[in-house]
Image (tube, rainbow, N blue to C red):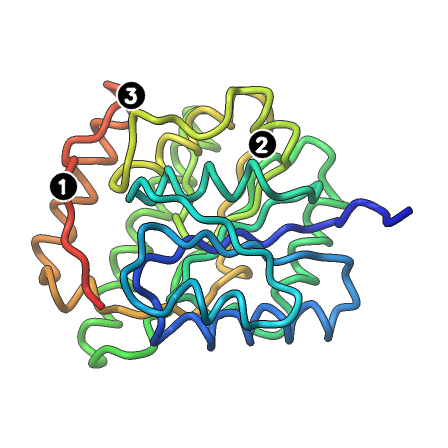
Amino acid sequence: MTSRPRVSFVVPAFNEERLLPACLAAIQAEIDRSGCHAEIVVVNNASTDDTGRIAAATPGVIVVDQPIKGLVQARSAGFAAATGELIANIDADTLVPPGWLDRVLAEFARSPRLVVLSGPYDYYDVPIHIRAAARVFYAVGFATYVFNKRVLGVGSMVQGGNFVLVRDALAGIGGFSDRFTFYGEDTDIASRMSRVGDVKFTYALTAKSSGRRLQGDGLIMTGLRYSANYLWATYFRKPFTTAWNDYR
C-alpha cells in the first residue's frame, strides 16, 4: 500500500504552455533533491492552448481539468484531487528554489500549531526598478504584518502562489471560499486560517516569479488593486475587484 504523500504541489494553470514546463521542472528538482514523498497536481483551468497536453506529458504529474475559469476555483479543484498532508500552492509562473522544501518541512516540524507558511516573490523577468518597487511594497507589508501580529495580536499575511497549508486545517474551515475568484484570495485564506492555527510569512521562503502583471497593469494600479482587495477581504469578506487582466 502506498503511503500518503507528505506534500502535494497544486499548480493552477490557465494558458501557461510557455512557463509551466520550467515551473514543473523546478518542483520536480526540489522533490528529487530533498527526497520528500510528494506529488504534483496541475489544474488545467479552461486553457485554450497546449497547457493540458504539456502537463499530461510530464512524468508523474496528475492533471485535473477545471472548466470554470478562476484562480480559486482551480485551487479548489486541485485541493480536492490532492492527497498530501501539506498542500503547496504554487502558481504556474513561479519557480521554487533549491532548499524551499527543506524550509517548509522544517517549519511545520518545528511548530505544531502552524497551519499556513508563506513567503514573498522575487520577480525575475522585470527591470530592476520594478523589482526594487516590489521589494519596498513587501517591506511595508511585512512591517505591517509584524506590528499587527506581535503588538495588536491580529492579522496575517500570505502571498498567493507561494504558500503551503495543512490539508486537514483547510478542510476544517470549509476549503477555499467561492466568494473569491482572483483578487483577495490570499488575504481570505490568511484571515480564516489564522482562526484555527498560526499563519507565518517569512523571507526565508522566497520564490522566483514572473512580474508580467506588474508590467501589464503598472506599479501604481497593481498596488492600488491589491491594497483595496486586501481591505475588502479583511473587513467585508469579499473581493473589491472581481475582474482581472490575463497576461500570457
Calculate the distance from the C-alpha at mark 2 to the C-alpha at mark 1: 31 Å
Residue drawn 23% across the image and 18% down it? 236
Calculate the distance from the C-alpha at mark 3 to the C-alpha at mark 2: 20 Å
Indicate left or right for 99 with 148 as reference: right
Tell which circle, 3 or 1, labels the residue nearer the N-terminal end: 3
Viewer-proximal residue among 216 and 64: 64
Q: Which residue is mark 1?
A: 243
Q: Which residue is mark 3?
A: 237
* Disc 3 versus disc 1: nearer the observer: 1
Residue drawn 25% across the image and 40% down it? 183
Indicate left or right for 171 with 247 as reference: right
Q: Position of residue 135 (x, y in %)?
A: 30, 64
Viewer-proximal residue among 177 and 141: 177
- How dense is the environment of label 3, judged by Cα within 10 Å: few (below 14), some, or many (20 and up)? many
Q: Disc 1 residue type? A: Ala
Image quarter where the C terminus lies is bottom left
Tell which circle, 2 or 1, labels the residue nearer the N-terminal end: 2
